[in-house]
Image (cartoon, helix red, strand yellow):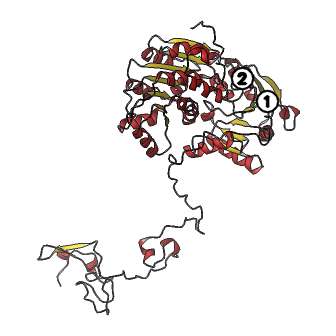
């Protein structure tokens, strides 16, 4: 672990002046501890293993060496061959990281793009064909583009793995190892993670060469966060939730299931509390639109599953509510890290029934969280005390980075009609018979005989046109689906189904010809 004295500003690291100016534009003037620890080694080209709690500034810690060590292209960029790669576990985290990296990369004259699933391939293929310098990707979609031949990682100079422990939890490590095998083995690699589990440790051993490890409070709760444990009755839990999130401040509420997140967001909107949901059942465009509405202040409540527990940075989140307590001590830290980010203060409230008290306190102890426990019922004063502070009206807000790119949005399928007839059937699309003027089967009453309507262009009796041989009386011409013996010309001749049909009650209908008794 490095023992260098932290530098008071970014100018002391020898960074390019345009990059330092870009940091000041975002209000970043002094490095955070994780940045001050890792930058001397990462800027020197060494492999780095950084461990820090969520919200500690890891993105800037790897973005600066990533941009600085990749030179500005002198000529035209090579299509489909990036020189920098950042792997992240979720699409939302990719958008978040891309915002920071792209802002700094523009100052250095570099181009950045995201490669994530849930969107159309068209835009990503087009950007790769024009040439990019840095790709920020999720493993699944990046492997798809590599298999299609649209992306080649043989020119990658710097590779970054962000939130490696979450990628291990989500089962992405096999894909990550295949992607790392496609990069040059002598390139610089940096891995940032909140924890160092067995699978992550094996990844470090196999792919990082003599890494410099830097750890800054990796397994401790955010010091500027106040944790509360509210013990509630199950019958009054819904009322307590509405009072907690209904104060008008920016609140992030976590649930265990996707269906509950969607249902709770709908109930809050019906009661006049503007809310959006965020979970895996939504399309990528819908997820980004809901995040944008929350980040821009158009809604005050975001009800989410653990998909929002990592990497989602939204300013001024004053309250995080665990409506359903997580089942993992690490999840407490990552969920709670959505507030009190970058030195700000925040409040975290965990709701639990009385029978859950012991299990929840055990998990909090493993996460090194010491909550203030209170028995709460609707209308208690403490609920109004922990609410998120209402945002100042008219406060300028930067346009959200989460708005989806129209070029990446998939074509939405038309929604099926929910209308049903009196028998419970949905209206059917027009069939061939409907286009000929017949009613659809669903519109006919049971037992009603359908009259035959002649097709256009078929010769009929009395119209002066020659009829096809084999027709009989006023009946329709035989269908071409059944075929009989071959004629002398070698062509099959259609059978007239009505001409040879035996009369009802005749023995010919059931007795073969060779078994009939001669009279």
Residue occupying the point 37% across, 32% down: 152
The disc, 2 or 1, on the residue closer to the chain's N-terminal end is 1
User: Hey, which residue is sitting farthest left in the picture?
Assistant: 488
Whether 153 is drawn above or below 39: the answer is below
Residue occupying the point 72% across, 42% down: 297
- Identify the disc placed on residue 492: none
Quick one: 272 or 149, which is closer to the camera? 149
Around disc 2, counting alpha carbons within 10 Å, would you say few (fewer than 14), some (14 to 19), or many (20 or more)?
some
Quick one: 277 or 114, which is closer to the camera? 114
| Left or right for 445, reference 335 | left
Location of residue 93 (image quadrant) = top right
Whether 489 is drawn above or below 212: the answer is below
Residue tagged by mark 2? Answer: 343
Location of residue 33 (image quadrant) = top right
Location of residue 22 in the rendering, given as x and y in whole percent from the top left corner: 60, 28
| Left or right for 437, reference 283 | left
Location of residue 205 in the rendering, given as x and y in whole percent from the top left corner: 45, 14
C-alpha separation, residue under disc 2 versus residue under disc 1: 29 Å
Describe the element under mark 1 as helix, strand or loop.
Answer: strand
Location of residue 258 in the rendering, given as x and y in whole percent from the top left corner: 62, 41
Q: Are marks 2 and 1 in contact (CB under 8 Å)?
A: no
Whether 252 is drawn above or below 4: the answer is below
Image quadrant in which the C terminus is located: bottom left
Residue 283 visible in the snapshot? no
Residue occupying the point 65% across, 29% down: 26
Image quadrant in which the N terminus is located: top right
Residue tagged by mark 1? Answer: 231
Describe the element under mark 2 as helix, strand or loop.
Answer: loop
Q: Nearer the viewer, mark 2 or mark 1?
A: 2
Location of residue 313 (image quadrant) = top right
Quick one: 133 or 85, which is closer to the camera? 133
Around disc 1, counting alpha carbons within 10 Å, would you say few (fewer than 14), some (14 to 19), or many (20 or more)?
many
């Amino acid at each position: 672990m490095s023992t260098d004295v932290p530098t008071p500003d970014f100018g002391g690291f020898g960074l390019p002046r345009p990059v330092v100016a870009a940091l000041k534009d975002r209000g970043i003037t002094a490095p955070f501890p994780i940045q001050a620890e890792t930058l001397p080694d990462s800027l020197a080209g060494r492999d780095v293993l950084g461990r820090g709690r969520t919200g500690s500034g890891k993105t800037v810690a790897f973005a600066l060496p990533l941009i600085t060590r990749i030179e500005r292209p002198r000529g035209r960029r090579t299509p489909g061959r990036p020189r920098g790669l950042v792997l992240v576990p979720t699409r939302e985290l990719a958008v978040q990281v891309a915002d920071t990296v792209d802002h700094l990369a523009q100052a250095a004259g570099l181009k950045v793009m995201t490669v994530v699933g849930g969107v159309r391939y068209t835009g990503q293929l087009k950007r790769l064909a024009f040439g990019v310098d840095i790709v920020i990707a999720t493993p699944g979609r990046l492997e798809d583009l590599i298999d299609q031949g649209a992306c080649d990682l043989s020119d990658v100079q710097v590779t970054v793995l962000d939130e490696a422990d979450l990628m291990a939890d989500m089962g992405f490590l096999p894909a990550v190892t295949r992607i790392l095998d496609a990069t040059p083995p002598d390139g610089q690699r940096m891995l940032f993670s909140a924890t160092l589990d067995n699978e992550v440790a094996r990844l470090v051993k196999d792919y990082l060469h003599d890494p410099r490890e830097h750890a800054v409070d990796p397994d401790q709760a955010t010091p500027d966060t106040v944790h509360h444990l509210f013990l509630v009755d199950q019958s009054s839990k819904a009322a307590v939730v509405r009072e907690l999130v209904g104060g008008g401040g920016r609140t992030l509420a976590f649930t265990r299931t996707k269906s509950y997140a969607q249902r709770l967001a709908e109930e809050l909107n019906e009661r006049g509390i503007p809310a959006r949901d965020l979970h895996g059942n939504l399309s990528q465009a819908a997820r980004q639109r809901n995040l944008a509405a929350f980040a821009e202040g158009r809604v005050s409540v975001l009800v989410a599953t653990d998909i929002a527990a990592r990497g989602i940075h939204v300013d001024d989140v004053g309250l995080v509510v665990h409506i359903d307590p997580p089942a993992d001590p690490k999840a407490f830290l990552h969920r709670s890290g959505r507030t009190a980010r970058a030195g700000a203060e925040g409040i975290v409230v965990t709701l639990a029934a009385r029978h859950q008290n012991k299990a929840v306190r055990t998990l909090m102890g493993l996460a090194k969280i010491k909550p203030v426990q209170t028995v709460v019922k609707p209308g208690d004063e403490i609920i109004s005390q922990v609410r998120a502070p209402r945002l100042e009206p008219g406060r300028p807000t930067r346009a959200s980075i989460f708005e989806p790119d129209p070029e990446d949005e998939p074509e939405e399928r038309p929604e099926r009609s929910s209308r049903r007839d009196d028998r419970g059937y949905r209206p059917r699309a027009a069939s061939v018979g409907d286009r000929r003027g017949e009613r659809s089967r669903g519109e006919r009453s049971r037992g009603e005989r359908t009259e035959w309507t002649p097709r256009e262009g078929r010769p009929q009796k009395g119209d002066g046109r020659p009829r096809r041989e084999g027709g009989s009386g006023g009946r329709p011409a035989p269908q071409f689906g059944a075929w009989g013996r071959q004629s002398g010309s070698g062509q099959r001749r259609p059978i007239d189904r009505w001409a040879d049909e035996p009369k009802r009650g005749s023995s010919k209908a059931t007795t073969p010809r060779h078994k009939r008794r001669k009279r």
